[in-house]
Every structure is written in structure tokens, then in C-alpha cells.
Image (cartoon, helix red, strand yellow):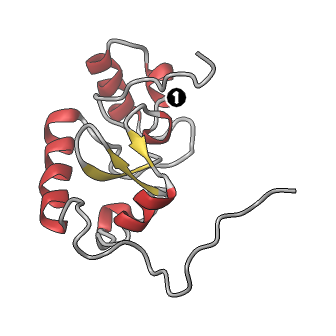
């Protein structure tokens, strides 16, 4: 039988003074990700042929082919954190227009902003296998 952790009654997340990025920091770091790290695409989709200009450009920047660039997402990046407590922290950052239709939100630990699992950037690195 599995034992589940009991969450104290009245638990509503983290204390307000718990450190995390501010909305202003997130906005600034998001802009840096777009400008300097090729974060995108602007309108993500699961359509396999969508956004060819973005993926061709990303592939060139990452020195891979466009097919491999399309396989890379924030959600399979080493720096993507969508753990339970990170989700609690992310809830403090209001949804922005760029969050809509881009999948779940996570925290990019490298660029320190709220990213979306359907996007990717040039900082992408493969996750280390837990089997190693």
C-alpha cells in the first residue's frame, strides 16, 4: 500500500517571502531569451510542418538539422523545471499573452524565466538520463 504525504489543512502554496523571480524579472528575462537565445516559436503548435523559418534558423544556430531542432522542446530540456513546488511558485507570475496556447508553463533554470513546454531555445540541452 502506498502512503501519501498529507498536506496540512489550509495549505495554499508557499509563504509570500519565499524567493522566486518577480513578474518584472520574468518579463525582462523572457525578452532576453527571445532576443539572444532564439526562444520560440512565437505561435507554437504540434503541426509537424509549422514554423519552418523558426526551426530552420534554430537548426542553424544549434548546428543540427531542422528535424532534430523540432524534437527539442523546453519540456525535454535539462533546464526545464515543472515540479510541484515550482508550479506553486509559477502561479505567482501572471499569465502573459505569450503563455496562451503554448502548453504548460515551467521554469527555465538557465535563463531564469517562465517558459512553455511547446517552445525551445538555443540553450536547450538534453536531459541526463536517470538511468546513468
Q: Quadrant of the N terminus?
A: bottom right
Above or below, 55 against 29 in this view is above
Q: Nearer the viewer, residue 113 or 14?
A: 14
- The x and y percentages for residue 76 are 50, 35
Q: Nearer the viewer, residue 119 or 53?
A: 119
For image coordinates 45% across by 81% down, the residue present is: 12
Q: Is residue 91 left or right of residue 1?
A: left
- The x and y percentages for residue 75 are 49, 41
Residue of label 1: 71
- The x and y percentages for residue 39 are 28, 40
For image coordinates 42% across by 74% down, the residue present is: 13
Task: Classify residue 54 by image quadrant.
Answer: top left
Q: Disc 1 on helix, strand or loop?
A: helix
For image coordinates 38% across by 71% down, the residue present is: 91
Above or below, 78 against 74 in this view is above
Q: Nearer the viewer, residue 30 or 9?
A: 9
Mark 1 surroundings within 10 Å by alpha-carbon count, few (fewer than 14), some (14 through 19), many (20 or more): few
Above or below, 55 against 67 in this view is below
Above or below, 53 against 5 in this view is above
So how many labels did they put on this image? 1
Amino acid at each position: 500500500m502506498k502512503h501519501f504525504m498529507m498536506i496540512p489543512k489550509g495549505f495554499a502554496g508557499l509563504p509570500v517571502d519565499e524567493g522566486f523571480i518577480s513578474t518584472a524579472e520574468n518579463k525582462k528575462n523572457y525578452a532576453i531569451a527571445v532576443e539572444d537565445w532564439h526562444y520560440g516559436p512565437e505561435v507554437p503548435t504540434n503541426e509537424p510542418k509549422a514554423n519552418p523559418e523558426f526551426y530552420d534558423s534554430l537548426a542553424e544556430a544549434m548546428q543540427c538539422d531542422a528535424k532534430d531542432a523540432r524534437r527539442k522542446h523546453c519540456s525535454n530540456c535539462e533546464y526545464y523545471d515543472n515540479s510541484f513546488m515550482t508550479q506553486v511558485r509559477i502561479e505567482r507570475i501572471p499569465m502573459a499573452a505569450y503563455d496562451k496556447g503554448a502548453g504548460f508553463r515551467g521554469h527555465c533554470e538557465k535563463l531564469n524565466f517562465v517558459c512553455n513546454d511547446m517552445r525551445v531555445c538555443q540553450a536547450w540541452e538534453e536531459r541526463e538520463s536517470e538511468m546513468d
